[in-house]
Image: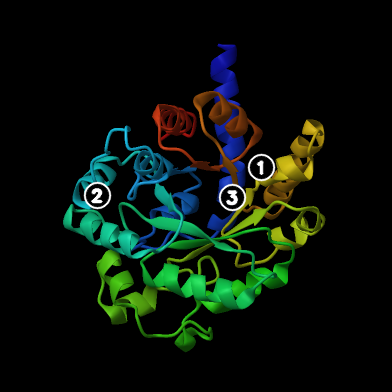
Amino acid sequence: MRHALALTLAVASVTAVVTGSSSSAQTADRMNPIIALQEKGLPVFGIAHPAIARGGRGRAAAADPGAPTLPPIVLADVAKETVAYRRADYIFTSGTSDTFLSYIEEITKAGGSMRTHPFTAKIGIWHRNPENVGAAIVRQLNAGHVAVSMEAVESAQEVRDVIKAMRLVSAGGTRPETGLEKAAAYWGLSVEQYKRKADIWPLSKNGELLVTVIVESLPGLEKVREIAAEPGVGQIFAGYGTLGGVFRGDPAGREAAAAKILAACKEFKVPCGFPTNNPAEMEQRMKEGWSVHIMQRRDENAFAAVETGRKMGGR
């Protein structure tokens, strides 16, 4: 009985945060499932995709002639595995390499699309190198991503600058209106249809692109209310890993920083995100009121965390 009451309270807490950016009615033909869930006041769960290239283990095997040779990764098989998993709401990736672009094409062949398997990735730190980050924004959106994750945000002006870089020239931004074919294909649209949809939500109620802000520094914490109040912010994440370095040896300070971010989200009714990697963490953070969760690994703990979150969120 006590546990059931706790879960009920947790769902109420999550709903109170998620509904913030969803004050407008849900668009009839909503494509981006992340936005669709936020408009309904439901929690959102993301997960990493399967490996699409050999990493450290492959290099180690190459350096050790006695090590067994790992079989090559077949992107068509990885894509089928990706499409078969439908419990998470979006997929987190690390870039837009040629391999990734081929992976996206294989997902489409396997029956997936932006509507079923939307991608997002970090873009870097805007205030350190706007030119490089601007180029990353164009690359990622042109690959078909539905959101960008801004790292180490320290002002609302950065958010406005990134939104301008995301918006097409015809919508008042600086994003070129060329090279949109791959994005349109993954979205299942013509280029002209894509251009009508590729605007920023919630600034545009019909937009399908999302801005995620990560707060993970002392200057960012100082300005977190200003950042949360910025109308174009779709989500705010606590950069909990980086905050561990900021508050090294001070776990209470790290938790207080996360609580400050969450409080700003609640005050300005912006969905608030946390890196959550197992069922126990999911239960704890959802009870606190975090409503967007990214599983940074793709393993049994991550899959179980998604299931815990879906159950707690009434999904």
Say left or right for 113 vs 297. Answer: left
Q: Distance between the residues labelled 2 and 3?
A: 30 Å
Q: Quadrant of residue 158?
A: bottom right
Pick the residue in front: 16 or 189: 189
Tell me the residue that label 2 is attached to.
79
Closer to viewer: mark 3 or mark 1: 1
Amino acid type at mark 3? Pro
Quadrant of image for the C terminus: top left
Q: Residue 216: give x, y in percent of width and height.
A: 70, 51
Residue visible at 49% across and 29% down in the picture: 312
Tell me the residue that label 1 is attached to.
240
Q: In the rendered image of this protein, does residue 37 appear above or below residue 108? A: above
Q: How far apart are marks 3 and 1 (CA)?
A: 16 Å
Q: What element carries label 1?
A: helix
User: Sequence order check: which comes first, mark 2 or mark 3?
Assistant: 2
User: Sequence order check: which comes first, mark 1 or mark 2?
Assistant: 2
Report the coloring of the rendering: rainbow
Amino acid type at mark 2? Ala
Tell me the residue that label 3 is attached to.
271
Pick the residue in front: 116 or 220: 220
